[in-house]
């Protein structure tokens, strides 16, 4: 399954991921209760999570998709965040809930929240599937997360390394082994 020089170790099973979806959806239902809600799904990494989560949410919502890229081929955020599609949104007077794959340094989220706030939504909040330790220290509007994880590089369930491994059903840690 792993490419030469790479190693995958299971971290969060498909079963644990699935078991977390309904509690997250109940939290969203309880919090927004029919208020105008837009889920803002951050592509590409959150696509699979969002698709699964949406089917558990009962309160009405609109869904929007935007792009955010900061990684290139590395495993640490480059610091430069490219957003795509934010200008198409119309969040004025709505509650925006950003569905993200991972909060790591929080840089992507900070840039994104600033861009969304320009549209004067009633509220903005983030729902990341995963949160790494650095992001726990930040002052970001994150009422609930899927899972808090250690500071490891992960792939699967939508998340990639250089566009690979998004199709893994469980979340895995990716490490690099000496080759040859
Ligand atoms: P941040 O700007 O450092 O918070 O990074 C956030 C983005 O980087 C996430 O939305 C992911 O797309 C990507 N990212 C961060 N950590 C990982 C990881 O462990 N695996 C795959 N992508 C990651
Ligand atoms: Mg990515």
Image (cartoon, grey):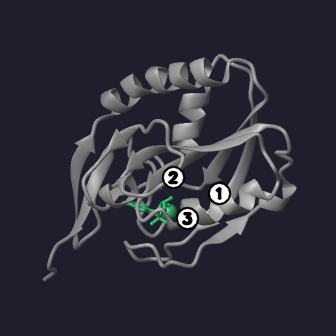
Mark 1 touches mark 2? (CB < 8 Å) = yes
Location of residue 159 in the rendering, given as x and y in whole percent from the top left corner: 45, 54
Residue at mark 2: 140
- Pick whichever, 3 or 161, lies toward us: 161
Q: CA distance from mark 3 to mark 2?
A: 11 Å
Location of residue 166 in the rendering, given as x and y in whole percent from the top left corner: 45, 53
The quadrant of the picture showing ligand 1 is bottom left
Q: CA distance from mark 3 to mark 1?
A: 9 Å
Residue at mark 3: 108
Q: How many numbered discs? A: 3
Write the residue at 64% across / 46% down: 41
Q: Is residue 139 above or below residue 23?
A: below
Q: Secondary structure at mark 3?
A: helix
Query: Which mark, by number, is residue 113?
Result: 1
Quarter residue 110 falls in: bottom right
Location of residue 96 in the rendering, given as x and y in whole percent from the top left corner: 70, 41
Location of residue 108 in the rendering, given as x and y in whole percent from the top left corner: 55, 64
> Which one is earlier in the sequence, the residue at label 3 or at label 1?
3
Mark nearer the viewer, 3 or 2: 2
Neighbours of disc 1 within 10 Å: few (<14), some (14-19), many (20+): some
């Amino acid at each position: 399954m792993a490419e030469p020089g790479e190693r995958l170790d299971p971290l969060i099973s498909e079963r644990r991921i699935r078991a977390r979806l309904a509690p997250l959806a109940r939290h969203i239902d309880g919090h927004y209760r029919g208020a105008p809600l837009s889920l803002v799904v951050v592509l590409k990494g959150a696509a699979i999570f969002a698709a699964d989560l949406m089917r558990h949410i009962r309160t009405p919502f609109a869904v929007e998709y935007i792009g955010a890229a900061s990684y290139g081929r590395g495993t640490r955020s480059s610091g430069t965040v490219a957003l795509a599609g934010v200008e198409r949104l119309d969040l004025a007077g709505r509650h925006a809930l950003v569905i993200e794959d991972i909060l790591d340094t929080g840089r992507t989220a900070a840039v994104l929240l600033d861009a969304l706030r320009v549209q004067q939504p009633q509220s903005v909040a983030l729902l990341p599937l995963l949160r790494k330790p650095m992001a726990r220290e930040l002052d970001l509007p994150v009422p609930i997360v899927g899972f808090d994880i250690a500071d490891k590089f992960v792939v699967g369930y939508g998340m990639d390394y250089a566009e690979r491994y998004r199709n893994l059903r469980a979340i895995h840690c990716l490490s690099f082994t000496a080759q040859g």
